């Protein structure tokens, strides 16, 4: 007998998933979960959006088979996400320069993009400092090196664009870069429209291969305004990739609904890209999931359902903006410092408070306030009634 698995040692648990497990096991009733990134209402629930439930009912009535949809997945879904990302993309479609594929969530799209970077000869992928931790894991597990570019100024709570551009002056032609779209994770700090333009010009000048990661579309200012900078970037950097996730804005977390998009200078190049990403998908997840993509396509293809979904999305966004302001005001009042006033100016589900890993652990153990060691907080996990108590706890460590 040769017990092969005995040679393995257990890996440390994923920090965020471990935090979720610890929160659930905590018997205290006065505990607060600001860790895992899901939207919660004021009752602490993550509801199914009404437009989603109605779309599912339509699908249940109409669906007659569960056969594979093919490597691209749902074409109506792909076409809808193309319009979300590129706006009026008819010229790209007519010229055959735009490709899209349904993927298992945003992670599936990122996996295809980083895999394509590797086939293009990329050796190093640049990520913002800080970034979503799984960006780093995904790039490294593909066998590529990670480099970091400066992003957030912790003192001002805004983009340190001068340092960002200085970081990227060290890139080499053929490097890759992942740039987050609206509602940066973990900081909530977004690029201005002019900064998007300047960054696009730099990627072209230095021959960097970009991929935009859009996971919180509609959570900053609205569906159109959120994409203004990214669309201008894509007009300048015409060899680009995009990862799009529907987990947050459609509430389809467990359905794993994402889209990979790519644009190229020529139809020949776009066709070649499609064959490569199809090959990468075939040797990993083989075929994309269908249910979430069908939900999104049904909603966006029905005027009444789309209006209902947009109204729900607006309510979610406005609630997060209100929670941001309330927490920012409470922390400024408690600490007597304007350092945290910038929280109110940031966007989306996340922000990052300036605490040490030791302080984050202390808040969890002493006060039942759960947040990761990085200080990232899930604004969408707040309840209005809890903000005074949470501000009391945080102010001890700020």
Image (spheres, rainbow, N blue to C red):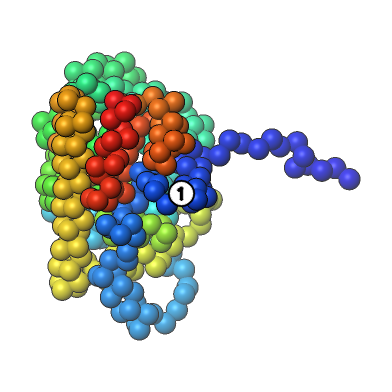
Image position, residue 135 (x, y; %): 41, 36
Residue 169 appears in the rendering? yes
Choose top left, top right, bottom left or bottom right for residue 374: top left
What is the quadrant of the C terminus in the image? top left
- Residue at 25 percent of width and 70 percent of height: 51
- Residue at 33 percent of width and 74 percent of height: 56
Image position, residue 204 (x, y; %): 23, 28
Image position, residue 189 (x, y; %): 22, 34
Q: Is residue 197 left or right of residue 142?
A: left
- Residue at 30 percent of width and 59 percent of height: 43
Between residues 349 and 196, which one lies in front from this camera angle? 349
- Residue at 47 percent of width and 60 percent of height: 287
Between residues 359 and 157, which one lies in front from this camera angle? 359
Q: Within 10 angstroms of label 1, few (less than 14), some, or many (20 or more) residues?
A: few
Residue under circle 1?
A: 28
Image position, residue 216 (x, y; %): 26, 48
Q: Is residue 345 left or right of residue 130?
A: left
Residue 184 appears in the rendering? no
């Amino acid at each position: 007998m040769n017990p092969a698995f005995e040679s393995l040692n257990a890996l440390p648990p994923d920090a965020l998933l471990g935090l979720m497990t610890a929160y659930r096991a905590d018997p205290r009733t006065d505990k607060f979960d600001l860790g895992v990134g899901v939207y919660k209402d004021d009752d602490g629930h993550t509801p199914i959006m009404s437009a989603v439930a109605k779309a599912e009912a339509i699908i249940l009535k109409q669906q007659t088979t569960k056969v594979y949809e093919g490597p691209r997945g749902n074409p109506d879904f792909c076409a809808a996400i193309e319009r979300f990302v590129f706006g009026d993309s008819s010229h790209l479609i007519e010229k055959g320069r735009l490709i899209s594929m349904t993927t298992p969530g945003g992670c599936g799209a990122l996996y295809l993009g980083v895999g394509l970077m590797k086939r293009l000869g990329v050796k190093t992928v640049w990520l913002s400092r800080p970034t979503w931790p799984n960006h780093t894991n995904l790039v490294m597990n593909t066998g590529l090196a990670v480099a970091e570019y400066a992003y957030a100024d912790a003192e001002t709570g805004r983009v340190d664009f001068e340092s960002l551009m200085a970081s990227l002056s060290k890139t080499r032609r053929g490097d890759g870069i992942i740039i987050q779209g609206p509602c940066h994770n973990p900081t909530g700090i977004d690029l201005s429209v002019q900064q998007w333009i300047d960054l696009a010009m730099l990627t072209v000048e230095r021959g960097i291969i970009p991929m935009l990661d859009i996971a919180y579309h509609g959570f900053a200012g609205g569906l159109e305004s959120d994409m203004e900078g990214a669309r201008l970037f894509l007009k300048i950097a015409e060899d680009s990739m995009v990862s799009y996730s529907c987990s947050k804005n459609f509430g389809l977390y467990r359905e794993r609904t994402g889209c990979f998009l790519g644009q190229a200078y020529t139809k020949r190049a776009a066709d070649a890209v499609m064959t490569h990403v199809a090959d990468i998908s075939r040797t990993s997840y083989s075929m994309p999931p269908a249910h979430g993509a069908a939900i999104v396509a049904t909603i966006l293809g029905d005027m009444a359902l789309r209006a209902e979904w947009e109204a729900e999305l607006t309510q979610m966004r406005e609630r997060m903006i209100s929670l941001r302001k309330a927490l920012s005001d409470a922390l400024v009042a408690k600490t007597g410092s304007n350092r945290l006033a910038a929280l109110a100016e940031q966007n989306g589900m996340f922000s990052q408070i300036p605490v040490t890993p030791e302080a984050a652990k202390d808040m969890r153990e002493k006060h039942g306030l759960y947040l990761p060691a990085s200080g990232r907080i899930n604004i969408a996990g707040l309840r209005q009634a809890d903000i005074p108590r949470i501000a009391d706890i945080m102010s001890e460590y700020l």
